[in-house]
Image (cartoon, grey):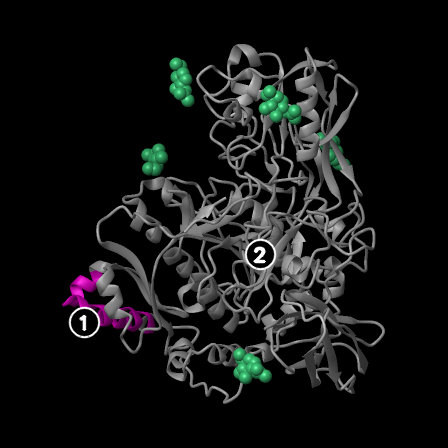
Amino acid sequence: MELSFRSHFLLSALFWCLVHSPAFGLEKPYIVYLGSHAHGPEPTGADIESATNSHYDLLGSYLGSNEKAQEAIFYSYTHHINGFAAILEEDQAAEIAKHPDVLSVFLSKGRKLQTTRSWHFLGLERNGVIHQSSILRKARFGEDTIIGNLDTGVWPESKSFSDEGMGPIPGKWRGICQRGIKDDFSCNRKLIGARYFNKGYAAYAGRLNYTFYTARDHRGHGSHTLSTAGGSFVPGANVFGYGNGTAKGGSPRARVVAYKVCWPPIHQKKCFDADILLGFDAAISDGVDVLSVSLVGDPEEFFRDSIAIGSFHAARNGIVVVSSAGNSGPQPGTVCNVAPWMITVAASTIDREFTTYVALGDKQRLKGSSLSANGLPSNKLYPLISGADAKITNVSAAKALRCLAGTLDHKKVKGKILACLREYGTVDEGHQAALAGAVGMVLANDEASGNDIFVAQAYVLPAAHISFLDGKVLFTYINSTKFPVAHITRVKTMLNTTPAPIVASFSSRGPNTVEPAILKPDITAPGVNIIAANTLAVGPTGEDFDKRRTPFKAASGTSMSCPHVSGIVGLLKTLYPSWSPAAIQSAIMTTASTRDNKVEPVHDSSLVKATPFSYGDGHIQPSRAMDPGLVYDLTVNDYLDFLCARGYDESQLRSFTNEIHACPKHFNVADMNYPSITVPNLNGTVVVTRRVRNVGTPGTYYVRIKAPAGVSVSVQPQSLVFERFDEEKEFKVVLKPKVAGKPVDYVFGRLIWSDGVHYVRSPLVVKHQ
Ligand SMILES: *[C@@H]1O[C@H](CO)[C@@H](O)[C@H](O)[C@H]1NC(C)=O
Ligand SMILES: *[C@@H]1O[C@H](CO)[C@@H](O)[C@H](O)[C@H]1NC(C)=O
Ligand SMILES: *[C@@H]1O[C@H](CO)[C@@H](O)[C@H](O)[C@H]1NC(C)=O
Ligand SMILES: *[C@@H]1O[C@H](CO)[C@@H](O)[C@H](O)[C@H]1NC(C)=O
Ligand SMILES: *[C@@H]1O[C@H](CO)[C@@H](O)[C@H](O)[C@H]1NC(C)=O
């Protein structure tokens, strides 16, 4: 299964895809999912042994002996998640799926892997100064919270994981710091734990050498995401001097834990379901409060999706799971991680750009973005040549225009600025231009990428990334001039840029293709040019040819926006330790903003108005999230009612939770108490029910509605009086299609409860049948 890309070539997100050709014959690694264990949340050694034995017995009854089962099973999930991962043949897997105790059997698939300013932009600080009223101070910088991260591991020596000034490790922590083989990996009072899981990977990769037995981050992805969620204060953090400031996570005093489930690519797949599921099981029993999961896969039915399964068990144990929406936008229906029991995060820009200008010989100036370390050697005009004009004889001009490997004539390029047309995944951070001897590079978007030049790359030579329209100007100039010349100015860090945020084009969009009645993504957060900790194992581009080493790097993707939300969740957890994951999710969603820093509606990168399919409830506003007024709360029972409505029967749900759940007779998915309201098939009058709980002061809330076009919306009652803290009230939303002008596509509106101080917003998303 391939995701269709029209996005950036250096996005840091992890993708999963079906692996079509595993390394061995008919046998493949499968996950046999059995739901929850009969034993309690803190199993004894005997409980774990008995769980493991029950797995051997179950599989043994199919394979003919307990010994064969022991050989086939490479993981038993024994703590919270009940199930095992085993090497099986396809027909064996199909047989086992029929067993009454088995909820699902699915292939352990792989996924592709793909600062300083963002907290200012989110209002946690003003130009580095953290005010008394900041949620950071009120929530004591997240000091009581433990944040876990499922990713590529961590670089433990990074200053972002320094434990200077941190007190003793919280008593609730039950995890370990797994030592590496031939790796001096150690934890401290900041990085309190680490584990690695590689057997699901080995099922494809074969025998692994010692470099696979460590939680150390050799890619840079996990160090970046974990430090964004909970990194310590590091003054003077920058990338080649750009974006200089104090790096920190959203919860800078939180404790952090790395669960390494991603490894070097095998056919571009890096993180495998069997490992991910064990990572979840370990994190739950270790006692994390928040799990940050910057991994995405193709949307799948919940019981066949390792992240949906793992996050259900996590949420049931009070853990908030935050995940990435994916980097497959801007096409509709691309959003991943669509289960209602996790927070799904889109990515948007902040008010900082890394700007450079291309000055042409005819005095035209084109604006570009870049994070090139150096400027051109001298302040003069250099000869400019297009890739097409620099081609070797036996390749097409079209190919050479893309500056692909082996298409450029070094004699023609040497000492010049090379102009290239960008193609997804091909122009490798200027590597080809540098190899061909260019002094600089101008990289123009192709038509598909349009105006989106927000992502600044750490090119290995002085370079500027320009828009498609400016590319036309550039190539027209080159064509019309005998001796074209140009200069590229040194990169400047520009602050307070407008408009911001803008939803990044790469950010995956709704609707939710698994359950259209649940809006996804839920929220957007900074995910473009985010500066955070790097590994010292690879350079800032992550490519082998990049021999530079930087303790911080800039990265873009929903992988970067996800840990911003995880960090904020860490603060909320410190403030409100008793709140359910759903209450925290609601607080974050209903207080989000749909306006940018010009007080205009947030835009998509195409500069049209963004919709909830791009940003969910809107852009995160942390200081509002700590005082939401009302929350839409949910319990595990609500999630189970939701699954009933989706067609799961009571015996499946009984295995899932190991508890009896009676499915309600009449329950509509749209009635689940989610903070957004989606009716994907409005075929007459539809009544949606919601409950809100008062987490603020007593008061009266009045409703305000912005009805979607062609839909009449009324709310009963129109006001809610709360006499006490924690009181819960129900209301109904009645939606009716207007006869005239019935739209066939999705339309969007808003429902707001306000007491004059709090604004509790929910998007209304409607499609007529
Ligand atoms: C370990 O295995 C990987 C993948 O096969 C290989 O690239 C690497 O060079 C090996 N390292 C050592 C030290 O053997
Ligand atoms: C970054 O800022 C710090 C503190 O403000 C300053 O000491 C340092 O010189 C700056 N570094 C760069 C590269 O600008
Ligand atoms: C073009 O010719 C060169 C030198 O003869 C050769 O190395 C290269 O592979 C050829 N490229 C293509 C695309 O045919
Ligand atoms: C420049 O000239 C090339 C080759 O003649 C042509 O293919 C291309 O379309 C021209 N570009 C512009 C922008 O005029
Ligand atoms: C609307 O759709 C629902 C579910 O598809 C169906 O049960 C119901 O009968 C429909 N109502 C009308 C008025 O067509």
Q: Which residues are magenta?
A: 47-70
Which residue is tagged 1? 61
The image shows residue 395, relative to residue 540, as above or below, that is above
Label 1 crowd bin: few (<14), some (14–19), many (20+), radius 10 Å = few
Position of 694 relative to 79 (above/below): below
**Is residue 185 inside the magenta stretch?**
no
In the rendered view, does 558 fall on the left or right side of 732?
Answer: left
Under circle 1, the secondary element is helix
Dot 1 amino acid type: Ser
- Residue that protrudes farthest toward the front in the picture: 740
Residue 467: where, in percent of width, then height?
68, 35
Magenta stretch, main secondary structure class? helix
Residue 110 in picture, x, y percent from top left: 39, 51
Secondary-structure class at tag 2: loop
Q: Nearer the viewer, mark 1 or mark 2?
A: 2
Residue annotated with mark 2: 332
Q: Amino acid at mark 2?
A: Pro
Q: Which mark is drawn over residue 744?
A: none
The extreme right residue here reads 756
Q: How many marks are shown on the rendered structure?
A: 2
**Residue closer to the observer: 393 or 121:** 393
Quadrant of picture, ligand 2: top right
Asked whether residue 226 is in view, the answer is no
Figure quadrant of the C terminus: bottom right
Q: Residue at x 47, y 76 (%)?
A: 646
Query: In the figure, is residue 576 to the left or right of 148?
Result: right
Q: Position of residue 702 (x, y in %)?
A: 81, 80
Percent position of residue 228, x then y:
62, 49
